[in-house]
Amino acid sequence: MTPEEFDIRRHFSILYEKIYSKPLVYLDNGATTQKPNCVLDKMRYIYEHLNSNVHRGVHYLSNQCTDLMEEARRVVARHLNAREDAEIIFTRGTTESINLLAFSFGETFCKEGDEIVVTEMEHHSNIVPWQMLCQRKGMTLRVLPILDNGDLDLAQLDTLLNERTKILCVTHVSNVLGTVNPVKDIVAKAHAKNIPVLVDGAQSVPHMAVDVQDIDCDFLAFSGHKVYAPTGIGVLYGKREYLDKMVPYHGGGEMIEKVSFSGTTYNVIPFKFEAGTPNYVGVIALAEALKFVDQIGFQYIEAHEQVLIQYTLGQLQKLVNVTIIGNPQKRSGAISFMIDNAHPYDVGMILDKSGVAVRTGHHCAQPLMERLGIPGTVRASFGIYNDKLDIDQFVKAVRVAANMLSK
Ligand code: PMP
């Protein structure tokens, strides 16, 4: 079946909602995506027919759920092209994945005087956990700046990375500017100095084929809810050579080998990092979502979204009062803009009244806003179901906002 015959929109009931009697134009996919019916059906099916806690049961339902969860781990591993299923750790989302890493990696490999490198365009969730680690250990956080167009200033990477650097943390795609960072080259540069790299894949996994062996990153985090899966499920991919050595993050059931008051030993990966009852329904639904996007194929998804992005950029550039924030060499997922001096929130309110959902504000990237010297932006972010009609309704609403708000 071709993607056109597949008729993507038909799989998302919510897209047929009316907002203030107008068709919903959902351009807030960077915040969260809508869920296809197959994902919703799967969750309902599990609760109706199979629900039972995983891993601990001897009974039929528990074994069924356990098998489905471990099969889902295989789907995720295959999707990211991980070497083995055990390198896939299930978390609540990108934020928890990075907190897990900052704690477990930090406790295992870092000491006073060491350094962590992040970039100026990171989401707070790839800054604050590392700041917390630096505070705990007496370490220093160093920052790779951006250029004025919104690309990373990679010329500075060499001088930033030194013998004290313990890990480099970089987003694959900026959630504000849409910049696609050349993570494969960045990883190669860091590895030349024996420095491991975490890639924040929150905004890349929904838009492109992400191959962790090709990138050769040591860790990658992403959130299910941004890739058409439910909330509360996410992934930390990590190379076994690191995960095996890292101390656990949370203690509790499932992550142990043997517990005694004289001392406890830990389970093997990935279970060492999955204390307590996991979100097994979320895990199984995540696999369903990944199978859904793989069925469409990233070749099509990337091409489709690029056409929409270029079309939107072209339309917005025709509006004299609109300034697009950032002009990266390679863009995916999002376009940020401002209307003259109008507050982004006011623009968002006017768009909302036209049925258009966008996000406004600092997008959890306050250091980036500080660098750009702006309080926030209006962000349109794209998904597989958006089409040219959406963009036309969106641009029309932006024109109305520009007429009302620009001075
Ligand atoms: N990193 C990036 C680049 C993001 O865009 C987001 C979500 N906006 C996150 C991390 C955090 O994701 P979550 O809230 O799902 O944990």
Image (cartoon, rainbow, N blue to C red):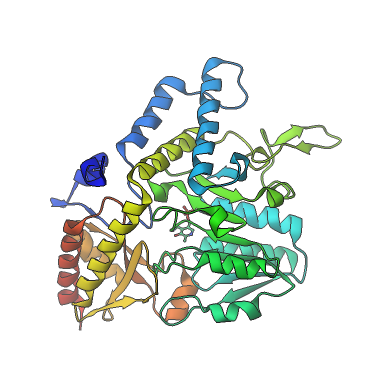
User: Residue shown at 26%/50% (left/top)?
Assistant: 385
Residue 245 position in % (x across, y down): 75, 49
Say which of 338 and 392 sits in front: 392
Q: Is residue 359 left or right of residue 77?
A: left
User: Residue shown at 51%/53% (left/top)?
Assistant: 211
- Image quadrant assignment for residue 131: bottom right
Say which of 269 and 3 sits in front: 3
Above or below residue 42? Residue 59 is above
Above or below residue 160? Residue 386 is above
Task: Determine the residue located farthest toward the top in the rendered image.
Answer: 59
Q: Is residue 324 left or right of residue 114?
A: left
- Image quadrant assignment for residue 290: top left
User: Residue shown at 53%/47% (left/top)?
Assistant: 81
Q: Locate the N terminus and report the quarter of the image it occupies.
A: top left
Say which of 132 and 284 sits in front: 284
Q: For residue 367, say whether it is visible.
A: yes
Residue 177 position in % (x across, y down): 39, 70
Q: For residue 127, say whether it is visible.
A: no
Say which of 247 and 350 sits in front: 247
